[in-house]
Each structure stands twice: as C-alpha cells, then as structure tokens.
Image (cartoon, coloured by chain):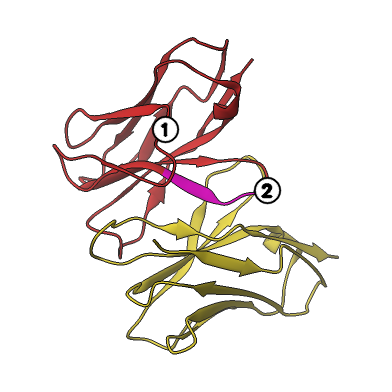
Chain colours: A red, B yellow
Amino acid sequence: NAGVTQTPKFQVLKTGQSMTLQCAQDMNHNSMYWYRQDPGMGLRLIYYSASEGTTDKGEVPNGYNVSRLNKREFSLRLESAAPSQTSVYFCASTTGGGDQPQHFGDGTRLSIL
Amino acid sequence: GENVEQHPSTLSVQEGDSAVIKCTYSDSASNYFPWYKQELGKRPQLIIDIRSNVGEKKDQRIAVTLNKTAKHFSLHITETQPEDSAVYFCAASKGTGRRALTFGSGTRLQVQP
C-alpha cells in the first residue's frame, strides 16, 4: 500500500518555466490538499479539493493552479515559476473533511533559480 | 480564518525529562487538533490527535490536552529519548467551511543524551 505518492522528488527550474507536480493516493480518500513548507515555518495550504470535481483556494494560492483529475490524482501547476516559489511541496489526503487525519506524501523539493 | 500559534520555537531537554509544547487557536469552531512529527527531510507524520469532545488523550509516552474555553492545547512527551528529536507541529481544523488544517510554526525538540 503506497499511500500518497508525489512526483518528482526534486526539481530545479529557471524563472519563468512551468511545471506540474503530481500527486496520487491509493486509499480511496475523498479530500486532497497541497501545502508548501518554507524553512522554519509550518505548512501553508495552497489549494484543496474536498471531493472529486471540486477545488478551492487556500491561504497562498497566487501563482498556482490545480486539477483534480479523478478521485486518486490531484496535480499542482506552476505556470510561470518565480524564486519566491522555492519551497518543499507536500500533498496530503483524508477520508472526509477537515476533522479527519491527513496522510502526507514524501514531498517535492523545488528550487527556482 | 483560523490562526494557530505555537510555543516554544525550540526546546532542548535531557534524555528522560519531559517536554511540553503549547498551541493556541483563534476559531472557536475548530474541533480537530492533530500533532505531527517531522524528521529532517521527511514527511510530517501524525503522532496523536484529539477532538473537541475530549479533554485529554494518551498514547504511551505521548499525551495531548485540550482546553476549549481558553482555546489552547498542549503536547506532553514523557521519558524523552534521543529519537524524539524532531520538529513537532500542531494544527487545527473544523469539519465545515474550509475543511483543511491550519498549522502552527513548529517546535524543534532536541533531546540531549
């Protein structure tokens, strides 16, 4: 049972490039989330998807877009990467709403030069 | 929206001593309070959680207490061991509205052998 799988694990981009971070879960969870973690800080919510077919903005959505492709997959896209988006990105999933345990992937370490 | 404050930011204890980390939250509607442990370069892992209908919960050397009136909750680790060294995050959420976790800024716990 893989849980939450994120790809890639590491990526270096140049300013202005675009890329998509992939996340897939095999736990039949309804809700999925994207967080970013900057040094010395907690995780901040970028976007979330309460159920298949719905997405909503979190605390820090600017510069990002998401797609809930199906129940298993939730992708995060950077259209024009900026150095301020250098961070570690975590995907998480949970069975239901915000009052259920969230399971995290291993993270994507993204550097933008 | 919800705001979670966490103290202290760093904590150093001797092996065998107890460690206490405290968090306060702002949204009285929050009803779920998990604690995550994150080792260097790894994913956050859930270690214990508590819901608002419970005042205290224990799991071996770890306990969490919740004071709904004061809107604060605490993590207690007894008989600390070097492998407890990590960054610990508290979080809060609710089952309605934006059903996602709001994290504290983290506490770096160092257990000295």
In the rendering, at what x and y percent does residue B8 appear?
Answer: 71, 69
Q: Quadrant of the N terminus of chain A?
A: top left
Q: In front here: B63 or A19?
A: A19
Inspect the magenta stretch and tell me whether residue A43 lies in it.
yes
In the rendering, at what x and y percent does residue B73 appear?
Answer: 52, 79
In the rendering, at what x and y percent does residue B31 appear?
Answer: 34, 74
Q: Is residue B85 above or below residue B41?
A: below
Q: Amino acid at mark 1?
A: Asn
User: Do the residues indicated by labels 2 and 1 lie within the same chain of the protein?
Assistant: yes
Q: Earlier in the sequence, mark 2 or mark 1?
A: 2
| Farthest-out residue, left | A53
Chain that bears disc 2? A
Residue B60 visible in the picture: no
Residue at (29, 56) in percent of width and height? B98
Residue at (47, 69) in percent of width and height? B48
| Mark identifier at residue A62 | 1
Magenta segment: A41-45
